[in-house]
Image (cartoon, coloured by chain):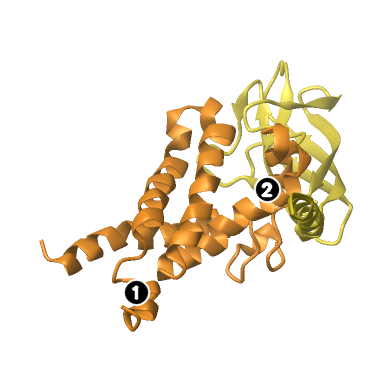
Amino acid sequence: MPHWFQDLLSAIPRIVCGYLLATNFGSAKFGLPWSPADANLHFFEVAFWFPNDVAHYGGIFAMFPAFFAWIGAFSEAVGGIFLLLGLQTRLFSFLLLLTMLVAIFMQQWENGLWNMLPAMGFCWVALYTTLLGSGRFGIDYLLTKSSK
Amino acid sequence: MKTLSISTFIIFAAMLTGCVQKSRTVTVNLKLYVTGIKNIKQVGVRGEGNPLSSDKDLVMQPVIKDSIYTVSFNTVTGYNFLECKFAIDDKVELKGQPNRRIDFVDKDTMSYEAKYQVPGKIN
């Protein structure tokens, strides 16, 4: 299989997940220009209910709920944009990977497998993009091409 | 170095608390008019956001049995609206239809009157 075709196939899940995170999952709880008007979120603001959810995880999450809620929502909403573009792919993928592990084990674990599926899907994609980067269908490739 | 990192983390965490959406307490007064149903055991309201629940009634009190029911509650929210449906004896109204929407932009108290199974408000 030609390398460009492998890169194209591996780029599709990254782009789809980035799009869904930036336009749906993330923007519903983190203020972006395209966040739903009903959510009443200002720019880069995390939804009022999310720190309360995070505090219920206990431990260090209960000590800094606003911090972890903001970072988690940021990694979904803004990380989704970077994942979609393939820009700073490894950095944002790693952040997203950590966020999804928290979502799986701290938020959805008791709600059963069905409720874990979205976070698990994003987790698998973030895992391979953390290791492999964007491939040639991302801005990272264009930025580093000249130095190769 | 370790102390500096922990201090930076705590300062950063404290700063981010300012980046949380502002929430406020809104008082909601609901009144439900019922016609054509007799011997009602329980009337309630269901929805999202404390104290409402999507699968458990917030019980409404009868003003006139089998006719008029009311409930008042406070909710802490960052949104400018609330969605709910009424339920009589565990039968939730408006099946397959959108939830009722109660808008409270710039208001801290909101009154909403409705007829069971009839979309929209009547006041």
In space, the residues marked 1 and 2 are separated at their CA atoms by 31 Å
Q: In which image quadrant can residue B34 be found?
A: top right
Colour chain A is painted in: orange
Q: Is residue A42 visible?
A: yes
**Residue A81 marker:** none
Q: Nearer the viewer, residue A40 or B72?
A: A40
Identified at 35% across, 79% down, the residue is A142
Q: Nearer the viewer, residue A124 or A42?
A: A124
Identified at 55% across, 47% down, the residue is A99
What is the secondary structure assignment of the residue under circle 2? Answer: helix
Please state, as top left, top right, bottom left or bottom right, where the N terminus of chain A lies in the image.
Answer: bottom left
Q: Using the image, name the chain to which the residue with label 1 belongs.
A: A
Can you tell which of label 1 and label 2 is closer to the viewer?
A: 1
Give the residue type that dot 2 points to: Phe
Where is residue A38 drawn, in percent x and y? 66, 59
Give the residue type that dot 1 points to: Tyr
Where is residue A40 drawn, in percent x and y? 71, 61
Where is residue A102 drawn, in percent x and y? 56, 40
Q: Nearer the viewer, residue A114 or A83?
A: A83
Q: Determine which residue is flagged by label 2.
A: A68
Mark 2 burial class by Cα count in 10 Å: few <14, some 14-19, many 20+: many
Identified at 43% across, 32% down, the residue is A114
Where is residue A63 drawn, in percent x and y? 77, 39
Colour chain B is painted in: yellow
Q: Residue furthest left?
A: A1
| Relative to B14, residue B66 above or below | above
Q: Nearer the viewer, residue A69 or A98?
A: A98
| Relative to A20, residue B40 above or below | above
Q: Determine which residue is flagged by label 1.
A: A141
Q: Is residue A23 visible?
A: no
What is the secondary structure assignment of the residue under circle 1? Answer: helix
Q: Using the image, name the chain to which the residue with label 2 belongs.
A: A
